[in-house]
Structure formats: C-alpha cells, structure tokens
Image: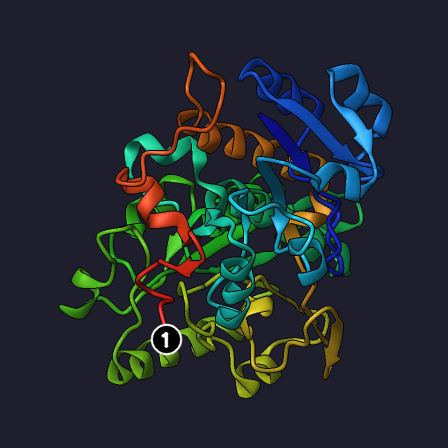
C-alpha cells in the first residue's frame, strides 16, 4: 500500500497532512509513505525529519503516481486530482459544501474521496474529529491574536503608579473553539463572559469561570442537533438575543466570534451598529470569516479599523499555529485510516456500510454518492 502526502497549495495554508510521528504509524500499518518535497516546511517539519521517520521525499508526480491513499489538509487542485489513479482514496478536509461542483472532478477521476469535516460526532470517532482538534487551537490562537492587537494588558495589575483594570472579553459561541478561547482568556487574567444558543453550554461556560449571557426560553431547549451542532434559531429569538448582545458588546474590550453552522453561511452576530458602539482600542476577532463571517464589517484575510475598533479577519486561524495543528490533524488521519486497512494483508479493506465511512465518503466508483451532494 502506497500512501502519498501532498504539499498544500491553498493560500495561507501552512499545515501538512502528516508529521514525522504519524509517518512512523502509517509505516507500522504496512504502508510505504511518500512525502512531496517541502510539504512540511510551513509546519517546521523539514524533509530530513520525514526521511528519518522512514518516508521517501519525492516530487509531486512521483508521490501521486500509483498511490493507493492520498492524504491532504485541503482540497487538491484539478491538476493534482488528474495525477491520482482510478480507485485511489483521497482523505482531507475537502470542504464539499463550498464547492459541490468540484466533487464531479473526483468522481470523473474514479477516486474515493473522503471529507474529514463530515466525521460523525460519535464516541468511536472522537479521535478522528478534525473540527474539534483544529477548532481547539483556533480558539487558543484567537485570544493571542486579540492580545497582540489590544493596546492594553489582560490581567488586573496593581502598581505603585495605580491599578490597571482587567480586560473584558466576550466569547460568542461556546463550542470547542469558544470554550478554548474562554480558558485561554481566563489564564491571561481577563474577565470573561460568553454566549451560545444552546442552553446546555451554560454549565460548561460557568465551569471555566466565565459568565453566561443568553436569552433563555423554550426555543433554546431544542437548539442543538443530535450530532452536537448548533441549530439556526428563529427570527424572533435572534431579535431578543441581538438586543441583549448589543448591550453586552458595548461594554467589552475584546469580542471573539466562533459561530458556524455546517453547510451554511456563518450567521451575522455583530452588526455595524454593535461595532460602532465599542470603545476605541477594542478588538474583535472573527473566527468564522472564511464562511462569510459573524461580524458584518470583517474582511477576509485582513485586520480593519472601524472608528478605532480593530476587526481581525485572519484566514485559516489553525494554520497560524501550524506545528501543533498539523500534528493533531495527522493523528486524526491515522485514526481514520487505521480501520480501513486489513491487519493481515496490510492493504485497504473498506467496509462501505460502516457509519463513519458512509458519513464521510463523497465519491466512489465514478459517482457522487453522499446523499447531501448528489445531483
């Protein structure tokens, strides 16, 4: 079995789909591992480390030629797909909702494409959950980015010259990214509050030492899907929540937004008026900017200044902590791939009826097979 690790080509993407440690584990599965030259440079994994781990470092053409499995962080280009053999397995965060048409390219090439974002949130798939591993680091990094742009300190400081008040930080969305942002901001000494449409998040937020801000009614009791994701709320609820949030935001020094709905444009949580109500010197970090943004005035890939309020819209936050993000993602891939490999023959043996396989496979045998993306 030949496994290829491709070099990422997406803008602002420093991650790689393998680490020296994961290469050793892939070889232990019985694979020959080929890594494209320079694939790990952005994650501080030089070619020499992959070679020491047992991989062969080669050109892209040589890596993809006759590869049984291709591991990626993001979607490959059409030209790269054209280098993959019929029947090959492609595994990565393929963003199928963002480009449904591109799935036809995978199908036409005859490859089985698996999208790691679609891994179901069930117990045995926890170690494969790329959304959680990457969001965890994104939430941590968001606080550091906010601190970098903020012209003051986070903790309260008592000095001979006077007292410096603690920064007030408001986290919008208490999923994996939001909870990590809360924990990080608290460690830095900030006074933290948070909101989420799921009433169940209240206990988690409070357990981390933050205050929970939420309009609580009957609708919030059913605001979470069986898969653990937030549902979109009614217009009436949104108006009530917006009023409460507007009053909260104007008192904050830093706001971090993390709200995403799978397959949908990110909901706008912070509108123009809310931004303009904040004090000059305040900072907003929009972690949903790649999916349209939670902040109306955020700009993808930029830090903008609106009346003295900085809005951080960095593309691909996990890539800004690429070493750890790559290492965790590589482990997710190893954990996903391991059940697909026969222990005796060391070759692929995919159970197409397995619920994890069915949830993640996009294309197979020349067709788009995932029910959410069939024409």
The colour scheme used to paint the residues is rainbow
Between 161 and 25, the one nearer to me in the picture: 25
- Counting labels gives 1
Instruction: Find residue 251 and report its horizontal and vertical position in percent.
Output: 53, 70
Relative side of 90 to 45, left or right: left
Relative side of 144 to 201, left or right: right
Between 332 and 183, the one nearer to me in the picture: 332
Most extreme residue toward the bottom is 273
- Residue depicted at 72% across the width and 51% down the height: 153
- Residue depicted at 74% across the width and 16% down the height: 54
Between 263 and 342, the one nearer to me in the picture: 342
Helix, strand or loop at mark 1: helix
Instruction: Find residue 141 and report its horizontal and vertical position in percent.
Output: 65, 48
Does any portion of residue 250 appear in the rendered image? Answer: yes
- Residue depicted at 45% across the width and 64% down the height: 259
Between 161 and 60, the one nearer to me in the picture: 60
Are there few (<14), some (14-19), or many (20+) residues within 10 Å of tag 1? some
Instruction: Find residue 374 and report its horizontal and vertical position in percent.
Output: 35, 68
The quadrant where residue 331 appears: top right
Is 94 drawn above or below residue 32 in the view shown? Answer: below
Instruction: Find residue 351 and report its horizontal and vertical position in percent.
Output: 32, 34
State which quarter of the image contains the C terminus. bottom left
Is 133 drawn above or below residue 253 in the view shown? Answer: above
Does any portion of residue 42 appear in the rendered image? Answer: no
- Residue depicted at 25% across the width and 79% down the height: 234
Relative side of 155 to 263, left or right: right
Which residue corresponds to mark 1? Answer: 244
């Amino acid at each position: 079995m030949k496994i290829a690790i491709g070099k990422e080509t997406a803008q602002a993407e420093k991650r790689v789909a393998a680490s020296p440690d994961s290469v050793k584990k892939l070889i232990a599965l019985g694979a020959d591992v080929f890594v494209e030259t320079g694939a790990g440079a952005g994650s501080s994994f030089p070619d020499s480390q992959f070679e020491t781990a047992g991989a062969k470092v080669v050109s892209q053409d040589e890596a993809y030629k006759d590869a049984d499995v291709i591991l990626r962080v993001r979607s490959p280009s059409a030209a790269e797909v054209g280098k993959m053999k019929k029947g090959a397995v492609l595994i990565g965060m393929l963003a199928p909702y963002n480009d449904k048409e591109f799935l036809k390219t995978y199908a036409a090439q005859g490859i089985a494409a698996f999208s790691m974002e679609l891994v179901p949130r069930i117990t045995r798939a926890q170690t494969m959950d790329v959304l959680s591993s990457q969001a965890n680091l994104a939430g941590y990094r968001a606080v550091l980015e906010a601190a970098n742009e903020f012209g003051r300190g986070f903790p309260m400081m008592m000095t001979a010259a006077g007292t410096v008040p603690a920064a007030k930080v408001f986290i919008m969305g208490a999923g994996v990214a939001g909870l990590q942002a809360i924990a990080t901001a608290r460690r830095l000494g900030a006074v933290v509050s948070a909101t989420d449409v799921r009433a169940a998040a209240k206990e988690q937020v409070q357990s981390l030492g933050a205050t929970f801000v939420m309009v609580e009614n009957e609708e919030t009791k059913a605001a979470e899907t069986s898969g653990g994701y937030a549902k979109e709320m009614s217009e009436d609820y949104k108006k009530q929540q917006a009023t409460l949030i507007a009053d909260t935001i104007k008192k904050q020094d830093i706001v971090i937004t993390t709200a995403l709905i799978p397959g949908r444009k990110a909901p706008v949580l912070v509108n123009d008026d809310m931004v303009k109500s904040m004090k000059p010197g305040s900072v907003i970090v929009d972690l949903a900017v790649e999916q349209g943004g939670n902040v109306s005035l955020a700009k993808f890939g930029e830090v903008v200044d609106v009346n003295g309020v900085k809005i951080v819209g960095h593309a691909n936050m996990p890539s800004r902590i690429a070493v750890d993000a790559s290492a965790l993602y590589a482990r997710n891939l190893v954990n996903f791939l391991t059940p697909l490999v026969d222990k005796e023959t060391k070759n692929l043996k995919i159970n197409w009826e397995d619920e994890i396989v069915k949830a993640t496979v996009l294309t197979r045998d020349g067709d788009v097979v995932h029910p959410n993306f069939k024409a």
